[in-house]
């Protein structure tokens, strides 16, 4: 009978189901809080720069929230992977891009009508470029 060497780390990679569940937990909490307060919310993959703040929305650092629950840190690539593989994440996210995630709340952070094909997935990005208010940080 052989035993795993603790110095070499775990014998198997951790289950990917546990990590997205922390993301799901954070998204549920953020969405519930925003809906209760009737707020718009935008999550950033890092502390947002002044030009990335979305005016009129609560701007939150997703990775700070994930750190608070002992979860995985996300960038665009890892978030896209979670989005593509976990249907729960898909139902909780309205839009995301390289810098931000817009949770699927009752009050949308993007004010662009659904049928506006000119903005498409860039709606949050365009709003972020126009925003300069840091009051929500």
Image (cartoon, rainbow, N blue to C red):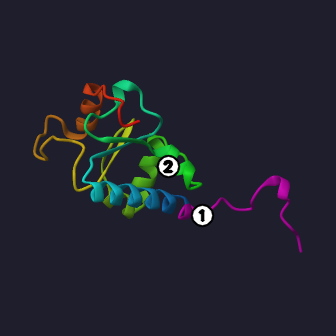
Residue 72 shows up from this direction: no
Q: Residue at x 46, y 61 (%)?
A: 25
Q: Residue at horizontal 47%, vertical 36%?
A: 46
Which of these two is toward me, 28 or 75?
A: 28
41 in the magenta segment: no
Mark 2: which secondary structure?
Answer: helix
Query: Percent x, y for residue 128?
Result: 29, 31
The x and y percentages for residue 88 are 38, 63
Marks 1 and 2, how far apart in space?
21 Å
Q: Which disc, if any, is residue 36? A: none
Question: Could you tell me which residue is drawn at 56 percent across and 49 percent down?
Answer: 67
Residue 25 vs 55, above or below: the answer is below
Q: Residue 83 at x, y = what percent?
A: 40, 54
Q: Hey, which quadrant is residue 104 in on the image?
A: bottom left
Magenta-highlighted residues: 1-18
- Which one is in front in this view, the residue at disc 1 or the one at disc 2? 2
Image quadrant where one finds the N terminus? bottom right
Q: Residue at x 25, y 26 (%)?
A: 130
Query: Within 10 Å of the Cα at label 1, are there few (<14), some (14-19), or many (20+) other Cα atoms?
Result: few
4 falls in the magenta region: yes
Say which residue label 2 marks.
Answer: 65
Q: What residue sits right under mark 1 in the picture?
A: 15
Q: Residue furthest right?
A: 1
Label 1 vs 2, first from the N-terminus: 1
Residue 54 showing in the rendered view: yes
Front residue of 127 and 6: 127
Give whichever of 96, 32 is nearer the camera: 32
Instruction: Give how far across and how far down residue 14 sits, in percent.
Output: 64, 61
For the stretch drawn in magenta, the main secondary structure is loop
Q: Tag 1's secondary structure?
A: loop
Of residue 64 and residue 72, the one placed in the foreground of this image is: 64
């Amino acid at each position: 009978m052989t035993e795993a060497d603790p110095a070499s780390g775990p014998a198997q990679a951790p289950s990917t189901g546990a990590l997205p569940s922390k993301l799901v937990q954070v998204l549920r909490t953020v969405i519930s809080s925003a809906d209760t307060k009737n707020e718009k919310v935008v999550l950033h993959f890092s502390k947002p720069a002044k030009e990335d703040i979305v005016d009129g929305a609560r701007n939150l650092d997703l990775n700070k929230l994930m750190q608070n629950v002992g979860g995985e840190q996300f960038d665009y690539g890892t978030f896209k992977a979670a989005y593509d593989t976990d249907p729960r994440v898909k139902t909780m996210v309205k839009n995301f891009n390289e810098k931000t995630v817009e949770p699927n709340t009752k009050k949308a952070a993007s004010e662009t009508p659904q049928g506006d094909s000119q903005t498409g997935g860039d709606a949050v990005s365009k709003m972020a470029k126009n925003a300069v208010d840091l009051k929500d940080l």
